Amino acid sequence: MTSTQAVPPPGGRGRVLRRSAVALALAAGLSVGALAFGGQDAPRAPAVAAVPASRLDPADLPRGITALQAHLKAQPKDASAWASLGAAYVEQARTNGDPTRYAQAEQALEHSLKLRPTDNDGALAGRAALAAARHDFTGALSAADAALAVNGYDELALALRVDALVELGRYDEALTAARTADDRRPGIPVFTRLAYVHELRGDTDAAHRILTQALDSATGPGDRAYVATALAQLALGSGRFAEAGQQVDTALRAAPDYLPALETRTRVQYARGNLRSATLGMEQVVARYPLPGQLVALGELYEAAGRGADARAQYRLVAAWTALAHAHGVDTDLDTALAEADHGDAADALRAARAEWAKRRTVHTADALAWALHVNGRDAEALPYAERATAPGYRNAAFLYHRGVIERAAGDTAAARRDLTAALALNPAFSPTGSQLARQAVAALKGAS
């Protein structure tokens, strides 16, 4: 976990496997009864917000997909149902770590647009979801804007527009977009995005306040689990382990099988010194959710337990996943850069990090490029990117650790000691491997002073 945030977001991570990972909503939600029994397309109007699928357990998705498929056999010209099916396939691919579903999602969405070429914000928002899942955030922004041109109150498009701007590093615009979404469609999907934009800008108090209010307003178990998990991750990233554990408990009481909460629980367990429980829990998460951030997290827990061979096996799986994902249209450069920098080929890490930086300039891509340059021995080049990763005020212990290590290698021991100490003060358990290395570096710097 040295190359990613300490905690990925609900359904994600490494944030892209990060909290800005796309919170996809089915165009008609997973409440597909209206589709299954309602006949032809209903009049489109701003509707009650659908439950974002990322706030539901992935086990619910097959039931929703089955219902949509059955409905479409009876009503094959239902454009809205095809749009919903496409969005469901996107979410299933994202939550199951199976990118082969993206081609089916694309076919369903294009079929929806063929049936209803105009006035079809559901399919256009689905296109935005698919582009975001494939890490094409420029395409996601364009598709979200197209959906909003049809229906300015489309909740999924409003949410995805915020996500795309965040992932493109356009944080001021993302804050404006989140506030616009809050004006038009206030609700859990918008509240969580607004909180995350504040967090990126360094205002964790505002993020905590918004999420707390969102939890108070949540009624369904999916919403409660989703928001409580976000609060747990916010607390964990700031080293407030007791609070993080309480929020995880809240999430799991609402939805005992909610996967992001189960994953966050493993990280709380590690932070509290229970390596065995954390490892067992992460093994169960990876069995259901084999994405790079989770695979690396399990590998580093194995390393902490002295299980080097098992750790290397996990890291090899990351390369296998990125190859499969790339074959199905997913931009995997950030995932590759993060994994290869710590656990693979340094040259591959730098190639991927440079490619990602050329496409989007976020705090996460800046950190990835800085770290890739460092592992290639190019610390003078790395330092400006490490500084940029923390420039907006975003407080991330792994970023501070990377910056401190780079400063030490570049010969600035005072800055290195400051930032490594700050990383451990913010979250002393930010990584099974990085935390230990940070403590060793601080001790060595103290001894040398």
Image (spheres, grey):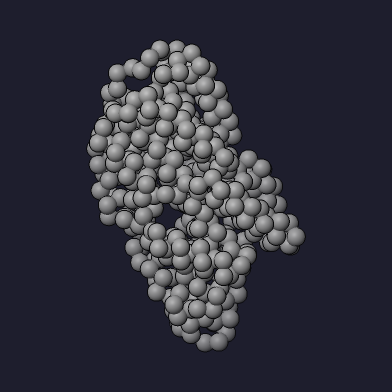
Q: Is residue 237 left or right of residue 202?
A: right
Q: Using the image as rendered, state which of residue 395 and residue 139 is in the foreground.
A: 139
Q: Quadrant of residue 39?
A: top left
Name the quadrant of the N terminus: bottom right
Q: Quadrant of residue 80?
A: top left
Say above or below: 279 vs 403: above
Q: Position of residue 352 (x, y in %)?
A: 51, 63
Q: For the image shown, how many numbered marks are present on the structure?
A: 0
Q: Is residue 23 visible?
A: no
Q: Position of residue 356 (x, y in %)?
A: 45, 60
Q: Is residue 109 visible?
A: yes
Q: Is residue 183 left or right of residue 19?
A: left
- Residue in the image at 31% along x and 56% along y: 170
- Residue in the image at 39% along x and 74% along y: 384
Q: Using the image as rendered, state which of residue 337 and residue 392 is in the foreground.
A: 337
Q: Position of residue 360 (x, y in %)?
A: 38, 58
- Residue in the image at 60% along x and 48% along y: 324
Q: Is residue 428 left or right of residue 149?
A: right
- Residue in the image at 56% along x and 66% along y: 348
Say above or below: 141 vs 442: above
